[in-house]
Amino acid sequence: MFVNIRRDLHQIPELGFQEFKTQQYILNYIATLPQERMQIKTWKTGIFVRVLGTAPTKTIGYRADMDGLPIDEQTDVPFRSTHEGRMHACGHDMHMAIALGVLTYVVHHPICDDMLFIFQPAEEGPGGALPMLESDEMKQWMPDMILALHIAPQYPVGTIATKEGLLFANTSELFIDLIGKGGHAAFPHETKDMVVAASALIMQLQTIVSRNVNPLDSAVITVGKLTSGTVQNVIAQRARLEGTIRTLSPEAMEKVKGRIEAIVRGIELAYECEAHIDYGSMYYQVYNDETLTNEFMQFVEKETNVRLVRCQEAMTGEDFGYMLARIPGFMFWLGVQSPFGLHHAQLNPNEQAIDVAIQLLTRYVTWKGNHHVKEEEQ
Ligand SMILES: CC(=O)N[C@@H](CCC[C@H](N)C(=O)O)C(=O)O
């Protein structure tokens, strides 16, 4: 059933804060469940679902992100995207189907504690976690702990991976506009060529990680998109670089940004142009609570047949980091074995992982959500 839900959601990917059909689909599904224990609130294109426990002493939060990416799907699956130029290429369709599976289970098999399911828009950008966290709706139902997962094409089905402490990087988008003077290709001396300025800028940005970041630390600056010029024999008046910065600490992010700004000032001087930097959306690092993560890892090893990998931190970003900065909890990778990675137009996660995750999470929340009863009984 939840494989079919994933397939339905896969066909209707929508960008951040445009998840209208996705939100309606989830609301329609939730309406088919027994309503007595559920309280539902919508927030923009997101949804909060509170499931009341039988004897609550805390609220366990579970977050699933909802948005797709501006990618033209290149798979040949029969349930491929019906939205041209949009794809669930980061697995959020899997995340939502799994969340609905866990939600369905706790509605039918109530646990002692309350649960809050958070269907969050705009993870890929501009970021839904922080405004959702600050919303009145969430403040009223603030969970005491929170968890989430992210699919991982690099791990086999039946495997999860996580670690205590830092799991995902600090991220910042990066947009740089260069404005010079266009003109005839044959008279470069009368122009300020922004193709040349952008080329120099990209090469100089590469020196930040190699020359300014401590080699024992780590950072990434990726320029994923460069646009400039109109035709082969006209010198480009403008150039736009679009990229992302990743660091392992908020302090390193500030340092990298300082160096980018210094280099851009130098480009303005050297290439006689105007430059504007926009950092777009920024995500705080995903930092797993040591105690809860360790307890979860022990649970996985002792109580389940899921294979646990103690992984390294990754340079991916996740706005779930904002939730973890305020609410103790953790995130983990879910193995979905696919030869194509996240954000790839041919990503095709193994759907057997949906059942693995639902089984694991329902067992964990049942144990964790009834935990205090056992403690009291002892
Ligand atoms: C898990 C994952 O792939 N997350 C995205 C988050 C995007 C953050 C933002 N739009 C940026 O590009 O900085 C990622 O790219 O890591």
Image: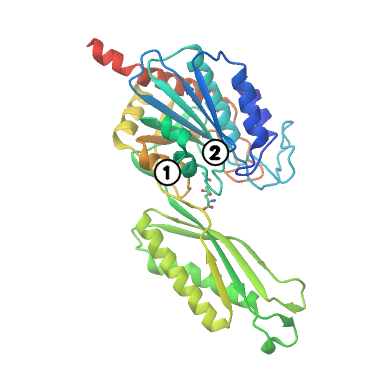
Residue 190 horizontal side relative to residue 290, left or right = right
Give, as a three-letter code, the residue at label 2: Pro
Quarter residue 190 falls in: bottom right
Which one is in front, 120 or 337?
A: 120
The residue carrying mark 2 is 153
- Mark 1 to mark 2 CA distance (whole Å): 21 Å
Residue 16 horizontal side relative to residue 357, left or right = right
The residue carrying mark 1 is 321
> In the current view of this chain or complex, which residue is farthest to the left?
378
x and y percentages locating residue 93 in the rendered image: 60, 33
Quarter residue 340 falls in: top right
Residue 319 visible from this viewpoint = no
Instruction: Tell me, yes or no, whether the two marked residues, 1 and 2, touch with CB atoms within 8 Å.
Output: no
Dot placed on the residue nearer the N-terminal end, 1 or 2: 2
Residue located at (62% from left, 77% from top): 196
Q: Is residue 305 above or below residue 265?
A: above
Quarter residue 302 falls in: top left
Residue 201 visible from this viewpoint = yes
- For mark 2, give the secondary structure: loop
Residue located at (48% from left, 43% from top): 131
x and y percentages locating residue 262 in the rendered image: 44, 74
Q: Nearer the viewer, mark 1 or mark 2?
A: 1
Quarter the N terminus occupies:
top right
x and y percentages locating residue 355 in the rendered image: 54, 22
